[in-house]
Image (spheres, rainbow, N blue to C red):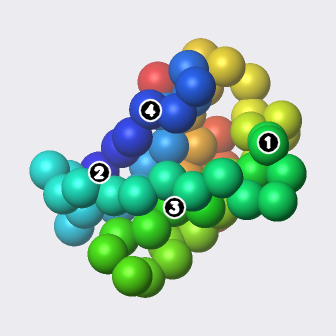
């Protein structure tokens, strides 16, 4: 249930482990929308997350790595 995006680990949920997800650039270069099939799971502001850290997509909480 994690993906790596530009040096950042993003937890997207155990049900998505092994599944293909889509990542789409938003209006801002630093913003990414994450999709599973046609459903938008959430978004990540890359500027607000340091490289080498992990976050939970749904709570934006920093995770232990």
Residue 1 is tagged as 2
| Image location (x, y in percent) of residue 13 | 34, 61
> Callout 3: 10 Å neighbours few (<14), some, many (20+)?
many
Check the image and report above or below for 53 versus 52: below
> Callout 2: 10 Å neighbours few (<14), some, many (20+)?
few
Q: Residues under labels 4 and 1: Cα distance?
A: 15 Å
> Callout 4: 10 Å neighbours few (<14), some, many (20+)?
few
Q: Is residue 7 left or right of residue 22?
A: right
Q: Residues under labels 3 and 4: Cα distance?
A: 12 Å
Q: Residues under labels 1 and 2: Cα distance?
A: 22 Å
Q: Residue at x 35, y 70 (%)?
A: 36
- Residue extending furthest toward the bottom: 39
In terms of depth relative to the viewer, which is nearer, 60 or 17? 17
What residue is disc 4 on? 4
Sequence-first disc among 2 and 3: 2
What residue is disc 1 on? 30
Circles 1, 3 touching at the beta carbon (< 8 Å):
no
Q: Residue at x 39, y 82 (%)?
A: 38
- Residue extending furthest toward the left: 18
Sequence-first disc among 3 and 4: 4
Q: Nearer the viewer, mark 2 or mark 3?
A: 3
Toward which corner of the image does residue 60 lie, by quadrant?
A: bottom right
Residue 34 is tagged as 3
């Amino acid at each position: 249930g994690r993906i790596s995006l530009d040096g950042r680990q993003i937890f997207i949920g155990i049900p998505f482990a092994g599944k293909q997800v889509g990542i789409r650039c938003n209006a801002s270069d630093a913003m990414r929308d994450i999709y599973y099939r046609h459903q938008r799971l959430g978004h990540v502001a890359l500027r607000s997350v340091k490289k080498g850290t992990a976050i939970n997509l749904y709570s934006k909480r920093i995770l232990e790595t």
